[in-house]
Amino acid sequence: MVEYMEGAPRRRGDSVGEGARPGGGRSARLRAEADMAHACERMSVDPRFVKLRRRFALQAGMLVGAFLFSYTAYLLLSAYARDFMSVQIVDSVNVALVLGVGQFLLTFVLAWAFGRFSTLSIDPLAEEIRDRARDEETISGRVIG
């Protein structure tokens, strides 16, 4: 029998020479793990799942990129544009302070945008994939997870 989860850590009592327990203990567990591995393998090549992963990666990449660009610009301005950063806006408030507080605001805006985009674009696709997987489990007569 091929073990599909070769990298999985062994649990207490899982030794190579361990005999079968009454009720099929170890063999039933191995069969269930193999079924789960097959289901995950099938799901990983599903075009909708690939689309879901791409959407998530694009969304996360764009938002992280926006944050890193903003923070790097703030750092570079602080280091090399001291005259600009020291311009007084109001009494004791200068450009550097406003841009620094803006970094915190940008972090919250990006977190809100991530949640909003996920709710509108990623969550419905994930729910569709989850429902289809449950339907396949019902058709095949297996219950996984």
Image (cartoon, rainbow, N blue to C red):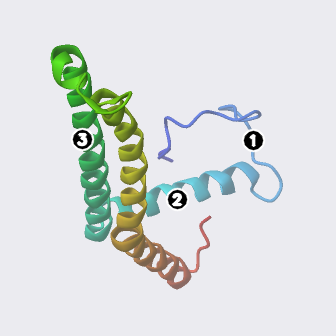
- Which circle's residue, 3 or 1, is located before the other in the chain? 1
Q: Which amino acid, mark 1?
A: Gly
Locate the C terminus and report the quarter of the image it occupies.
Answer: bottom right
Residue 84, horizontal then vertical, whole percent:
17, 24
Name the residue nearer the viewer: 73 or 141.
73
Marks 2 and 3, how far apart in space?
A: 35 Å
Which residue is identified by label 3?
Answer: 65
Where is 46 relative to 56, above or below?
A: below
Which residue is identified by label 2?
Answer: 36
Name the residue nearer the viewer: 24 or 143.
143
Q: Secondary structure at mark 1?
A: loop
In front: label 3 or label 1 = 3
Name the residue nearer the viewer: 24 or 78.
78
Badge 2 vs badge 1, beta-carbon distance below 8 Å: no
Q: Residue at x 21, y 35 (%)?
A: 69
Which residue is identified by label 1?
Answer: 19
Q: Residue at x 38, y 53 (%)?
A: 109
Where is 30 relative to 87, above or below?
A: below
